[in-house]
Image: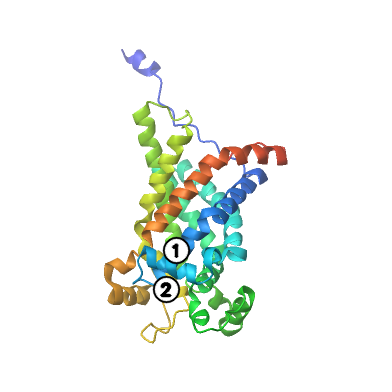
Amino acid sequence: MVAAAIEAPIAEKPHLEKKPIKFSNLLLGAGLNMFEVTTLGQPLEVVKTTMAANRGDGFSTALGRIWGRGGPLGFYQGLIPWAWIEASTKGAVLLFVASEAEYYARYMGASEFGGGILGGITGGVAQAYATMGFCTCMKTVEITQHKMAAAGVKPQSTFATFMDIYRKEGIRGINKGVNAVAIRQMTNWGSRFGLSRLAEGWIRSATGKQQSDKLSAGEKILASALGGGLSAWNQPIEVIRVEMQSKKDDPNRPKKMTVGNTFRYIYANNGIKGLYRGVTPRIGLGVWQTICMVAVGDMAKTYVEKLTGDQVTAKH
């Protein structure tokens, strides 16, 4: 009996394979994000930002406000170059850092769920401080500087606005709200990666699939949509970020805005409801991003492999 116990196989830890960082992976990530933001992504972003900045507006009022700023083109304010810069660097920064962080977290003994959260948090923070601070700031400035147009004054061009802020406030000015962006990104991508991994586990259990078995396109969309939708719990951080970056004139606003005093200002004026303004288009944005990554991803993967002659190994 002792011999039998000695000979019994010891359960081995699942083998962790570190995915190589390839140009094809980064190109795929950048290409998919560019497609997502140029189609429905930016219109949903503009609606979300408008509702967060004008917290008394309902969904239909926000649509009317955006249409009044420039018809159909009003829904694409901030797309060029800021949303394009943000989208194209997302693959290079977020996916690269998140993948590395998740691998090392799993190597150190973290679960799939925990590794996904740590990877998402690290990637989100890196992306926020590397490129998203000034990109989100400039997008928000463009979307919220409607007062000039309403007064009959033609608003400045994107680059004129950028240079004006830079001359007056320097690097800090164009990165206004970057700490709120970092908090949003780390909670958003931490939740999204972790909850998506958790949902994948539930789907595998329900369908009897092993860890090595691939999920179908529908199952991937369901897992990622659950992760994206549920990660909207941190919408108050997004509303705070928009308020910090907006060019709205209000004598009651704190002169030096921080995450803390901006939260108090919004809560005092609009209550809990105000902190969740724009959550519906944000959930829609998460679902659209998921559909692009999964449904369009397979076609884009084939094209990138032909273009680079390199096999794409990244998840999408």
Q: Which residue is mark 1?
A: 47
Callout 1 touching callout 2 (CB < 8 Å) = no
Q: Nearer the viewer, residue 288 or 95?
A: 288
Q: CA distance from mark 1 to mark 2?
A: 15 Å
Q: Nearer the viewer, residue 21 or 267?
A: 267
Residue 5 x, y percent position in the rendering: 34, 17
> Is 24 positioned to the left or the right of 142 in the image?
right
The residue drawn where x is 41% and y is 40% is: 222
> Callout 2: helix, strand or loop?
helix
Mark linked to residue 243: 2
> Is 2 positioned to the left or the right of 256 in the image?
left
To which quarter of the image does residue 219 belong?
Answer: top left
> Callout 1: helix, strand or loop?
helix
| Neighbour tally class for label 1: few under 14, some 14-19, many 20 plus, Cα within 10 Å | many
Residue type at numbered disc 2: Glu
Mark linked to residue 187: none
Q: How is the image coloured?
A: rainbow
Q: Is residue 122 above or below residue 107?
A: below
| Residue 178 appears in view | no
Residue 122 x, y percent position in the rendering: 48, 55
The residue drawn where x is 41% and y is 27% is: 209
| Residue 161 appears in view | yes
Residue type at numbered disc 1: Val
For the N terminus, which image quadrant? Answer: top left
Q: Is residue 260 above or below residue 205?
A: below
Residue 257 x, y percent position in the rendering: 42, 79
Number of marks in the rendered image: 2
The residue drawn where x is 58% and y is 63% is: 79
| Neighbour tally class for label 2: few under 14, some 14-19, many 20 plus, Cα within 10 Å | many
